[in-house]
Amino acid sequence: MNPILTFIIILIGFYGLATSKNIIKSVFCVTIMETGIILLFLNLGNLEGGMIPILDRLGIAIVDPIPQALMITTIVIGSTITSLALMLCIKIFHHFGSIEWKVVLKREDKS
Amino acid sequence: MTFIPLLLVFVPIFTAVILYLFKTTKYSWIVFVGQVITLSLFVIYVIGLPDHLTHLLIIGGTDEMIRISFYNDITSISFVALTLFMWFVILLYTYNTNRKETKFLFFLMFLEGIFLGLLQTNDLFNMFVFLELIAILVTILISYKKTGSSFRAAIYYLLLNTVAAMMFLVGIILIYYTYGNINIQMVMNMMAEHSDTMTIKLAYVLMLSGISVKAALFPLFTWLPKAHGVAQSTISALLSGLVVKGALYMLIRINHQMFQNANYGTEEMLFWIGTTTAIIGVIFALSQKDLKQILAYHTVSQVGIMLMGLSAITGLSFFGGFMHIFNHALFKSLLFMGAGVVIKVYNTKKVYEIRGVMKTMPWTGILLVVGMLSISGAPFFNGFVSKSLIKYAFKADLVKMVLFTLINIGTVTSFIKFSTILFGPKQSLRVRRNIKQHVGMSILAFMCLAIGILYLPLGKLYGMDLSYVHLWDIMSFVDYIIYVGVGYLFYHYVIHKDFVFIQKIRGFSMTFEHANFLYLAYIILIGFVVLM
């Protein structure tokens, strides 16, 4: 995959954040952006025809292992943030009766 | 001794976990045990450091390039000291009210460990992880009251800060792509080699934009007042006093150290961003009627003043900005804590409904006065020293001096508004005595005064000669009295009348889409300055 394509995915996420009026859509736009970033980094560490990075076979071209290690951490953090944000969405729906940014930011708290 | 930086991260986290496992409120005092252990470890660590006060800890081997490392220098040690001190005061303040909330104390102590990690790490990816963890924990702490408005503020904070951290991550990726490692010290040494390539410039722009959201610079500060308005006073004090400062620490680490050799010439740009932030923050603060909102917008404006100082990179002005970070942490937490006590007794947040604090709660009133004098830069208080130092770099530039004076007058005016709560007849309210809270706040007030008077020996610790600031200069007293006079007139004839345009400013609220749109515009603006 071309790195330019991953940048386009990141920008799609940003476009969604700057236009979507729904909180859940915003949460998913953050997820899309994160996917783009993960793909970008995995791309940069990739090597055509490279082997698995286990260092008992010397002399063979291997894939850079650091991007993969780092991106696993990013995926974990990303899923934490998504779940926390969705939990907040549910709570907001219970309190305001809507998940539109405009309504939520204007409306007074019911409870 | 060698592994103390790691222990500083883990001892608070272990304390939090133990507290959570026992779950009974009987063992809440464990937080103090953990705090004392962390403090004593830190003291042992500082005594054992060599004279140049730098320490590099490589975890799990000796090869710096592929291992995770912790790096401490005088900047990070100062920040660690501030963090430990502030957490101690905050625990004292919050212990009586939140003793039974073990979950709250769990998140609070966990946040301390993570924050200490952010301050000491030497690895860019670790920095990103700590940044995200801080965002998650602060989100939980903001929404801890479980009201609708707190959830609303929490999700606004979480999403905006996640986007910022993601941009920071893209910057890290580009740096790894170019230099092959993400160790701050190593990248710093190699920086001059590729600094003129497009990739590194883009990385710089994205990292700076990520930090700007965390530091609540203009126009990205919209999350800060929302979060402060709904959180508990403890959390507001913590956010204003430390979490925002964490971003400024990252600015020093990344902009002033890592990209030091790149010479992108962004000092002037950072100065003007700081000035705009300070002015806009003051304008919003003047229009507010809510005690906590006034203080929250003042955090924005004070961050702008700090950036004005920090943008000088070296010299007395930089040290002034650096010192203002610490001073602001002291007096702003003092003000938030005092406001919290007042709000609890009066059961309202409106400035015009609270009267007679001085007679009802004399000691809280005196502490609030100390905080207000410090933030408005009165001689003998710490705000005066750092504000005078910040002025050093542009004392010959008329435009900048006029703007700085205007910001000062705005600050004084809004604290004249704030101080109206002190006057008036005694109210018949039930005031609960809380010794721990008052001890905590008194320590902060004492530190404000101590730094304001003993700044010369403090400067010597950092190898700085601060004799530029004259404490006994009659002109500074005259200046301050003029500020107060002008501020009073401005308050009496403009702010107090509550004109329509002031109401319009107060009603201003930014939607999430627009905040993101502004963020994109901000990235493009910095990119334009750096790339051109």
Image: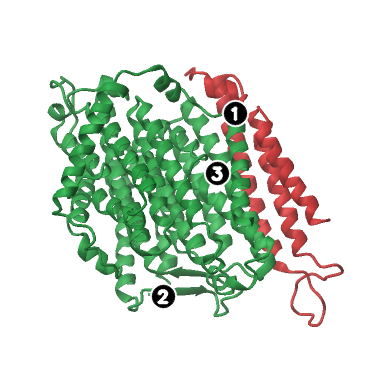
Chain colours: A red, B green
Q: Mark 2 points at which residue?
A: B2
The amino acid type, in three-letter code, at marker 2 is Thr
| Residue drawn at x 42%, y 51% as measured from the top left | B307
Q: Quadrant of the N terminus of chain B?
A: bottom left
State the residue lying farthest toward the right: A49
What residue do we see at 47% from left, 43% from top? B138
Q: Is residue B114 above or below residue B338?
A: below
In this rendering, which labeled residue sits more in front, label 3 or label 2?
3
Determine the CA span between mark 2 and mark 1. Answer: 46 Å
Residue under label 3, please give it: B161
Residue holding disc 1: A90
Q: Which residue lies furthest to the bottom in this view?
A: A59
Badge 2 vs badge 1, beta-carbon distance below 8 Å: no
| Residue B519 at x, y percent in the picture | 59, 41
Q: In this view, does A62 lie above or below A70?
A: below
SS for dot 3: helix
Front one among B360 and B526: B526
Same chain under badges 3 and 2? The reply is yes
Secondary structure category for the residue under label 2: loop
Report the amino acid beneath label 3: Asn
Task: Residue B351: give its label.
Answer: none
Q: Which of A2 and B310 is in front in this view?
A: B310
Q: Which residue is drawn at 68% across and 41% down?
A: A14
Residue B473 visible within the image:
yes
* SS under mark 1: helix
Residue in front for this viewpoint, B22 or B343: B343
